Amino acid sequence: MSDDVWKRAEIESPCIKICVIHPESRLCTGCWRSIDEIGAWSKMSPEVRRAVMEELPARASTLSKRRGGRTARLARSSE
């Protein structure tokens, strides 16, 4: 017996479970959605979700990579 109640024809979330919000852009560095988009995702229409999904690849290139951290400190100390 098939349970059609739980089958949904909606766009899946782009979440990859790397949830880190970039402090300046306020975008998640895992899925590239804004905090507002993440919070509203379950209430968005399929058309709005599709529009967000289409924008995500372009967002990835807008964030600069971190320049700090342990590797940068080690490189500076060896100069």
Image (spheres, rainbow, N blue to C red):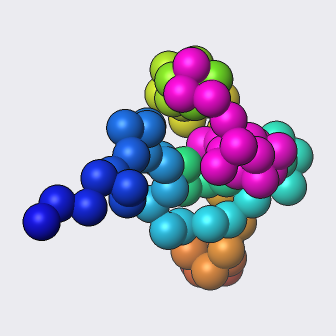
The residue lying toward the viewer, choosing from 70 and 24, is 24
Residue at 38 percent across and 55 percent down: it is 5
Quarter of the rendering occupied by the C terminus? bottom right
On screen, 18 above or below 22? below
Residue at 54 percent across and 27 percent down: it is 46
Residue at 62 percent across and 66 percent down: it is 19
Q: How many marks?
A: 0
- Left or right for 56, reference 73: left
The residue lying toward the viewer, choosing from 55 and 22, is 55
As for residue 35 lying within the magenta part, the answer is yes
Q: Position of residue 12 (x, y in %)?
A: 42, 45
Quarter of the rendering occupied by the N terminus? bottom left
Which quadrant holds residue 20?
bottom right
The residue lying toward the viewer, choosing from 50 and 42, is 42
Extreme residue in the front direction:
1
Q: Is residue 79 visible?
A: no
Q: Is residue 16 visible?
A: yes
The magenta span reads 32-47
On screen, 38 above or below 64? below
Extreme residue in the left direction:
1
Q: Position of residue 45 (x, y in %)?
A: 63, 29
